[in-house]
Image (cartoon, grey):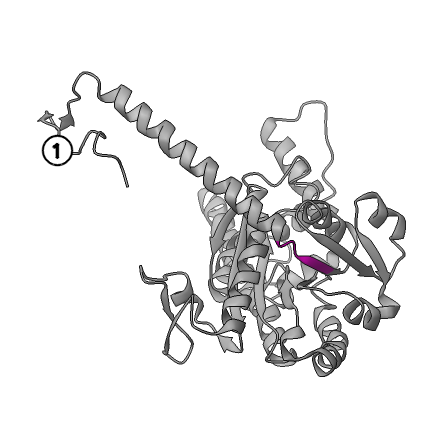
């Protein structure tokens, strides 16, 4: 809340423009400095809480992206990575521990993991979750139902990942669906300003309604998927611990400067089909043309070559996953084809021709 010294909005208007009194700007600057100081103090308190109760985070899939996020995670807690290849030396360099994927049971059972981030490819995600489940169940049998870590996915497609986790994971496992919309190349200089999309999917066996979770009221109330009202601070130890664990994990991304966007998995996939997938699609299409730099490239063409380079730096498996596991991707392809047909028709119409004059005009991949 602004202090009583802050200039109010009832200033006299002249010609539709508010007038300011002498000294108003100085008062606003003072208020700005006060709020900045308050925010800095709150941030220090958040960091103190994070470091006083550090998370132990396991990462399944300790390849390039897994190592990338591990470097930041080690600032705030303990990290244990696992993967098919041997990344022991790299893990040691960034202050993490490494366990081979062949010992997945040891990865789960021998470490007090608060969070497990599944950072594998889209196409191998379901098999990885299935492999993980028996070890989670064994851990709960030996150490209690509350021993299940928070499971986090970081896939580029969200409904697919959400459905798989809800289908296979024990109901005692809390679930956070997330998509860091950046990677080792785009965020090589840090995470500041990069977008992190997330959905709190399940806490304490309660499947949350993402549309309601993103609109928590002033009393911290929200609805579950059955329309039942709950509170973020319900009188349940497991619920409070579950919410706290989620918030501590999200705070790592906040502290690294990410732009935090709570969003349902369904909304995410609708948006990314018209942004991320079409970007990769165009990069692949243009790359298939065999375009090369020339001595007279325009800035626009240089941007085209950068798009090709960026999209081809990711694996074709990623591109295939964006296509296969986002139910909106085919709509994007159809719309792209229709748009191309319309533009070509306009060109031919301008020239007094029909599209039947084009070689292979009646052929289509759709």
What x and y, as percent, mark residue 185? 70, 41
What x and y, as percent, mark residue 140? 70, 79
Residue shown at 58% from the left, 69% from the top: 175
Residue shown at 51% from the left, 72% from the top: 237
| Magenta residue check for 57 | yes
Secondary structure of the residue carrying tag 1 is: loop
Residue shown at 66% from the left, 26% from the top: 297
| The N terminus: image quadrant | top left
What x and y, as percent, mark residue 75? 68, 44
| The C terminus: image quadrant | bottom right
| Residue tagged 1 | 10
Q: Residue furthest front?
A: 52
Q: Residues within 10 Å of mark 1 (few under 14, many from 20)?
A: few
Quarter residue 17 falls in: top left
What x and y, as percent, mark residue 301? 62, 32
Q: Which residues are magenta?
A: 53-58
Q: Residue furthest top?
A: 22
Report whether 173 appears left or right of 345: right
Residue 20 appears in view: yes
């Amino acid at each position: 809340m602004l202090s009583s010294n802050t200039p109010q909005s009832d200033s006299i208007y002249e010609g539709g423009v508010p007038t300011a009194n002498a000294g108003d700007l100085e008062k606003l600057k003072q208020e700005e400095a006060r709020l900045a100081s308050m925010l800095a103090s709150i941030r220090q308190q958040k960091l103190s809480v994070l470091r006083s109760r550090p998370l132990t985070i396991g990462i399944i899939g300790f390849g390039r992206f897994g190592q990338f996020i591990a470097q930041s995670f080690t600032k705030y807690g303990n990290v244990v990575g696992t993967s098919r290849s041997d990344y022991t030396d790299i893990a040691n360099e960034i202050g993490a521990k490494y366990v081979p994927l062949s010992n997945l049971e040891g990865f789960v059972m021998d470490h007090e993991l608060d969070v497990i981030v599944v950072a594998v490819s889209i196409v191998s995600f379901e098999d990885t979750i299935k492999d993980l489940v028996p070890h989670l169940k064994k851990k709960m049998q030996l150490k209690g139902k509350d021993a299940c870590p928070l499971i986090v996915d970081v896939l580029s497609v969200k409904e697919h990942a959400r459905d798989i986790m809800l289908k296979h994971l024990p109901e005692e496992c809390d679930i956070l669906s997330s998509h860091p919309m950046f990677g080792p190349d785009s965020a090589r200089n840090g995470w500041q300003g990069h977008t992190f999309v997330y959905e709190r999917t399940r806490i304490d066996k309660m499947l949350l309604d993402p549309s309601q979770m993103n609109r928590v009221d002033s009393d911290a109330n929200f609805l579950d998927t059955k329309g039942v009202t709950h509170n973020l601070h319900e009188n349940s130890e497991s619920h409070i611990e579950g919410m706290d664990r989620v918030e501590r994990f999200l705070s790592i991304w906040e502290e690294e400067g990410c732009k935090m966007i709570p969003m349902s998995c369904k909304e995410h996939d609708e948006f990314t089909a018209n942004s991320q997938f079409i970007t990769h699609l165009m990069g692949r299409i243009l790359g298939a043309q065999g375009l090369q730099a020339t001595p007279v490239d325009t800035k626009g063409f240089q941007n085209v070559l950068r798009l090709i380079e960026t999209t081809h730096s990711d694996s074709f498996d990623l591109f295939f996953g964006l296509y296969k596991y986002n139910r909106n991707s085919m709509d994007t392809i159809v719309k792209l084809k229709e748009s191309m047909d319309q533009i070509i028709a306009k060109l031919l119409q301008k020239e007094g021709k029909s599209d039947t004059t084009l070689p292979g005009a009646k052929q289509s991949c759709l």
